[in-house]
Amino acid sequence: MVLSSTEEQKEGQHDSSKKKLHFVIVGGSLGGLATGLALKALGHNITILERNPKPLLQDQGAGIVAGGDTLEFFKRYNRCNRPLAVNSYARQYLDREGNIVHKEEMLQNMTSWDLTYNLMRANYDGVESPYCEVPDPVPGDGKAVHIHDRNVTDIKEELSSDEGGGVRVFWKSSQGDEGSILADIIVGADGPSSTIRKLVQPNVERKYAGYCALRGTMPEEQASEETRKTCSERFTFFHCPGVQILTYLIPGKDGTVEPGKRLLNFVYYTNFPEGSDELEEIMTDQNGRRRPITMPPGMTDPQAWEKQRKLARERLPPQFAEIVCGTNKPFVQVVTDVLSLEHEYWGGKIVLIGDALAGFRPHTVASTSQAAFDAMIFADYVDGKVSREEWKKQTLGFARYIQKRGVDMGKHSQHMDLPLEDHIHDRNVASTPRQEEVYPEWATAF
Ligand SMILES: Cc1cc2nc3c(=O)[nH]c(=O)nc-3n(C[C@H](O)[C@H](O)[C@H](O)COP(=O)(O)OP(=O)(O)OC[C@H]3O[C@@H](n4cnc5c(N)ncnc54)[C@H](O)[C@@H]3O)c2cc1C
Ligand SMILES: *[C@@H]1O[C@H](CO)[C@@H](O)[C@H](O)[C@H]1NC(C)=O
Ligand SMILES: *[C@@H]1O[C@H](CO)[C@@H](O)[C@H](O)[C@H]1NC(C)=O
């Protein structure tokens, strides 16, 4: 299959900001959809290529902290009328016995990956779901196409007779079909193991950070009264050497935010030294297959998980032990680091955004915000509202600075024995609104 840029491209050549472009976005997760939404609102035509062989990405059912840029993104581009998040009213820390030892008021918005994804699909290409009603199309929006089972394998610059030319994107399907599509600009939104990044920057590596995040959810109605009383609508933490665990409430089935039907989401960071038997054990699924990065929900080996439950009861406060042991479909994510050197290549014909640009450690709670921010500022740049220099400075500053912050937070929480105040400080710093961040010179130099 070959698609090419539309005729409309030739219109308005004297006013480059009005020229309709064809963007091919590689990766149809939150970053790709956010970019597609922002660019189609400018009237450009978008094709998203997603390698997953199924039409909808399978969620892992877990939570996302909706930071300022995620909320701003939804304010700008979401036209579905429904709540986006569950509020958390305070941040608090427990001791080993489960007593609250520190608490501060703090309003935060907690959502779920599946609600975010389904809202974005409803807005991008009108996918129906129980999560929301599909909004009416907006006149003047560009064409928004999403094609699944398109594993992008290569890109090639193509010079055409008229000015510009484009980039050809090559894909393979799970059935062995092959094809290509021509883009004016390619956006690599293909995550921390980005193929696009590897093609333009083969030396950038994704590295293991020495620990994993055990994750899962438990329906709030199944939790004991004591646990609900402590954890409901509060962002709750516990630290001890080599361990950090946190929990917050997120929307439940089909995105419901109705009290009683929400989910207690937990993220439990615990160390598994590189090359250790423990790491092999937790990342080998119930069929004996070693998973490199993610152990999908429900696939953990029952014996390996039982060991984690026992450890949880031994070392965690009772509320956390209850939530970890009460989850039916735990999943595991290996924590990694990756940072691209640049965010645009080939004279701006290739742009990286989100996790493909910088894979943050989850402590930063900034991955979705980064994707949302990168999408918004890229659209503003394409629209002529911000200069190339400003776009570069803001995008790279965020990527480099928050990537380093994640590494530091991880080092403090997993590999040092620090007083609680230090972890509280790290957490508070991670809540700085992006507009108030002061990026050091190394973060914005290019
Ligand atoms: C299925 C799924 C579930 C997730 N669930 C959660 C969650 O519950 N909580 C949370 O905090 N974060 C979750 N994440 C991660 C979260 O989406 C990201 O951390 C963040 O939002 C930035 O997103 P991203 O789009 O930049 O990268 P990612 O979310 O990693 O998306 C990259 C996308 O690119 C696709 N892709 C990769 N290579 C190719 C290729 N060669 N050709 C075509 N497509 C390709 C992948 O299949 C994937 O859909 C999930 C990601 C996925 C893919
Ligand atoms: C979260 O949502 C509330 C409204 O429900 C809002 O007032 C608040 O500012 C939001 N918090 C953040 C961090 O954006
Ligand atoms: C995508 O293609 C690459 C390179 O050909 C291959 O290694 C990988 O397994 C493919 N992934 C999927 C999900 O098809």
Image (cartoon, rainbow, N blue to C red):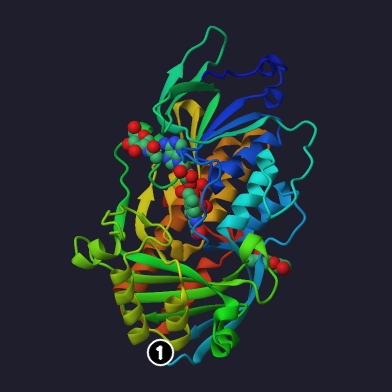
Q: Residue visible at 25% across and 64% down? A: 281
* Image quadrant where one finds the C terminus: top left
User: x%, y% of residue 283?
Assistant: 30, 60
State the residue in front, 200 or 331: 331
Amino acid of disc 1: Arg
For mark 1, give the secondary structure: loop
Seen as rendered, the residue at the extreme front is: 287
Q: Confirm whether residue 220 shows in the render.
A: yes
Q: Residue visible at 77% across and 45% down? A: 135
Q: Is residue 214 above or below residue 371?
A: below
Seen as rendered, the residue at the extreme top is: 161
Q: Quadrant of residue 175?
A: top left
Please rate how many residues cluster around mark 1, counting C-alpha atoms within 10 Å: few if below 14, some from 14 to 19, many from 20: some
User: x%, y% of residue 256?
Assistant: 68, 65
Q: Quadrant of residue 294?
A: bottom left
For disc 1, the marked residue is 96
Q: Confirm whether residue 366 shows in the render.
A: no
Q: Is residue 442 above or below residue 309?
A: above
User: x%, y% of residue 130?
Assistant: 68, 54
Q: Is residue 121 above or below residue 388?
A: below
Locate residue 418 relative to residue 162 in the image: left or right: left
Cβ of mark 1 under 8 A from ligand 1: no
Locate residue 431 relative to residue 154 in the image: left or right: right
Q: Residue visible at 32% across and 81% down? A: 310
Q: Residue visible at 69% across and 52% down? A: 74
User: x%, y% of residue 9?
Assistant: 66, 18
Tell which quarter ligand 3 is in: top left
Q: Is residue 445 above or below residue 104?
A: above
Locate residue 25 relative to residue 36 in the image: left or right: left
